[in-house]
């Protein structure tokens, strides 16, 4: 499911040593968001950012960073 995929994304990202200085909550929220997109689950940026207590801008920025670092693409973002 999405949570297992999110954990895998975080492990891959952590191996690239790009997590320094990034708040763990924002990284976890980002991984969950990307995993939800990959699994075609409808969770909005707004909902994830509210639950994680981060801004949507932070989520979008971390998402772009993580996707680029992991050389991934996802479908349309919400």
Image (cartoon, grey):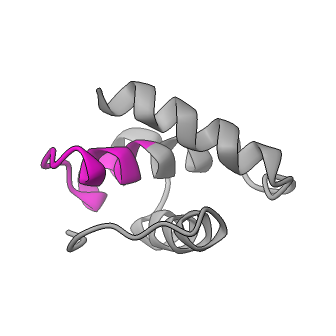
Instruction: Decide whether residue 48 is among the magenta residues.
Output: yes
Q: Which residue is drawn at 80% across and 45% down?
A: 15
Residue at the farthest front position: 71
Residue 64 visible at all = yes
Q: Residue at x 48, y 52 (%)?
A: 30
Q: Quadrant of residue 45?
A: bottom left
The rendered magenta stretch, by its main secondary structure, is classed as: helix
70 on left or right of 6? right
Image spot of residue 72 (x, y percent):
48, 66
11 vs 46: above or below? above
Image spot of residue 75 (x, y percent):
23, 70
61 on left or right of 20? left
Q: Which residue is drawn at 19% across and 48% down?
A: 43
Image spot of residue 24 (x, y percent):
68, 41
- Identify which residue, 15 or 31, lies in the foreground: 15
The quadrant of the rendering that contains the N terminus is: top left
Q: Quadrant of residue 4?
A: top left
28 vs 75: above or below? above
Image spot of residue 63 (x, y percent):
50, 65
Instruction: Decide whether residue 78 is among the magenta residues.
Output: no
Q: How many labels does the image show?
A: 0
The quadrant of the rendering that contains the C terminus is: bottom left
17 on left or right of 10? right
- Identify which residue, 1 or 61, lies in the foreground: 1
26 on left or right of 49? right
Residue 53 visible at all = no
Residue bounds of the magenta highlight: 32-50
């Amino acid at each position: 499911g999405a949570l297992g995929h999110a954990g895998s994304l975080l492990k891959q990202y952590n191996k690239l040593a790009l997590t320094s200085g990034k708040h763990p909550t924002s990284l976890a929220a980002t991984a969950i968001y990307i995993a939800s997109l990959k699994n075609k689950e409808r969770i909005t940026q707004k909902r994830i950012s509210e639950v994680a207590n981060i801004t949507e801008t932070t989520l979008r920025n971390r998402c772009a960073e993580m996707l680029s670092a992991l050389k991934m693409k996802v479908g349309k973002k919400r």
